[in-house]
Image (cartoon, rainbow, N blue to C red):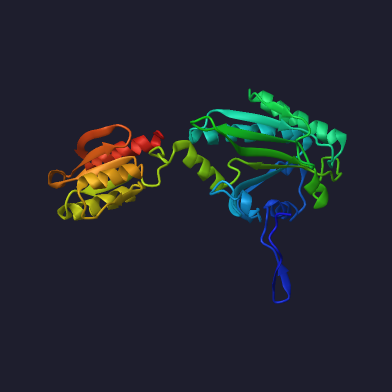
């Protein structure tokens, strides 16, 4: 119901894809699979499109075209809990890198209308709850809130002012293996269907970026900031030195820009602060003559002068420590 209308070109019909799942299924089905090969894990950053109603669109948080960090796992029943545990470990590590340490986890169980046998639902639900318990994660059960094709785990993250955001999902799927006739060759020669697991750590890149902006209020930590350092020449005479230093910073993988405008230094500093750039490098005639920079940190204020080479080393260490 959220798909865009069919497009016609040269007597052929086309649709823009609303999901990545069928393409991963086709990769799995491209040849016969043995039980020894499982689990098979396929992932991509795939752009998908959904025709959301205009009333629910909301900045980066709800859009019609977005990129999912989409992955699908095809595994045997005996592998399911371990695979979910590994996804949970990866999720915790990934979100922790971005400063999210407080989560709420929900296990959504079988709704009234569903596909799959009682045995499949029981196995999958026990595997999900077992994985959560094995990882020492507290969770709440949402009875009947799973989707029709399998139980799921939803993870909500808490930002700096206590708001909760829906983020990561681990979803067991009984429908697609049946619908697309997915199977593998078991040890006894039979051809059972694998269990399919959908997982997304961010949900979508756009939504996750939106959550990060809200979480940090635009003041990103140094390692994550789009511009890590801005060079502020006091006069036009320092422009060549600023350009040379910016080239050296970029060569080391540092995201640096130069404010070449003929504005007063105070104005440049205020604008850099409004843009929440972590490091402001003031370059006057003394700094130019000595091959130095005068560092002003967004977080710590004036940190004095240092040699440009020493600053690059200092900055790289700060970035490596994810400060």
x, y percent for residue 110: 80, 35
The tally of labels here is: 0
Q: Is residue 193 above or below residue 104?
A: below
Q: Quadrant of the C terminus?
A: top left
Q: Residue furthest front?
A: 55
Q: Is residue 213 left or right of residue 164?
A: left
Q: Residue furthest bottom?
A: 10
Q: Nearer the viewer, residue 220 or 183?
A: 220
Q: Please name the residue shown 26% across and 39% down the image.
A: 311
Residue 167, quarter of the rendered image: top right
x, y percent for residue 86: 63, 33
Q: Nearer the viewer, residue 245 or 191?
A: 245
Q: Is residue 263 left or right of residue 256?
A: left
Q: Quadrant of the N terminus?
A: bottom right
Q: Nearer the viewer, residue 197 or 296?
A: 296
Residue 22, quarter of the rendered image: bottom right
x, y percent for residue 206: 54, 48
Q: Is residue 1 above or below residue 296?
A: below
Q: Please name the residue shown 25% across and 43% down the image.
A: 281
Residue 157, quarter of the rendered image: top right
| Residue 183 appearing in the image | no
| Residue 234 appearing in the image | yes
x, y percent for residue 19: 68, 53
Q: Please name the residue shown 57% across and 48% down the image.
A: 58
Q: Is residue 98 left or right of residue 30?
A: left
């Amino acid at each position: 119901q959220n798909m865009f209308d069919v497009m016609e070109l040269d007597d052929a019909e086309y649709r823009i894809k609303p999901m990545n799942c069928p393409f991963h299924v086709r990769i799995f089905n491209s040849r016969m699979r043995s039980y020894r090969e499982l689990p098979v894990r396929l992932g991509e950053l795939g752009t998908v499109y959904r025709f959301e109603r205009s009333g629910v669109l909301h900045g980066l948080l709800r859009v019609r075209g977005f990129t999912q960090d989409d992955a699908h796992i095809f595994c045997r029943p005996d592998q399911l809990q371990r695979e979910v545990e590994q996804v949970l470990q990866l999720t915790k590590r990934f979100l922790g890198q971005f400063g999210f340490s407080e989560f709420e986890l929900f296990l959504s169980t079988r709704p009234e209308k569903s596909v799959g046998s009682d045995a499949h639902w029981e196995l999958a639900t026990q595997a999900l709850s077992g994985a959560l318990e094995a990882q020492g994660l507290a969770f709440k059960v949402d009875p009947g809130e799973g989707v029709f094709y399998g139980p799921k785990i939803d993870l909500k993250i808490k930002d700096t002012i206590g708001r909760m955001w829906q983020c990561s999902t681990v979803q067991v799927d009984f429908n697609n293996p049946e619908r697309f006739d997915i199977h593998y060759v078991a040890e006894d020669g039979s051809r059972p269907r694998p269990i399919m697991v959908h997982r997304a750590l961010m949900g979508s890149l756009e939504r996750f970026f939106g959550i990060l902006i809200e979480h940090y209020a635009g003041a990103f930590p140094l390692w994550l900031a789009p511009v890590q350092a801005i060079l502020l020449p006091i006069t036009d005479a320092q422009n060549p030195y600023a350009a040379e230093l910016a080239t050296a910073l970029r060569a080391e993988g540092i995201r640096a820009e130069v404010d070449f405008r003929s504005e007063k230094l105070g104005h440049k500093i205020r604008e850099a602060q409004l843009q929440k750039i972590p490091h402001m490098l003031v370059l006057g005639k003394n700094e130019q003559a000595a091959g130095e920079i005068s560092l002003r940190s967004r977080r710590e204020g004036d940190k004095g002068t240092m040699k440009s080479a020493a600053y690059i080393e200092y900055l790289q260490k700060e970035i490596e420590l994810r400060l």
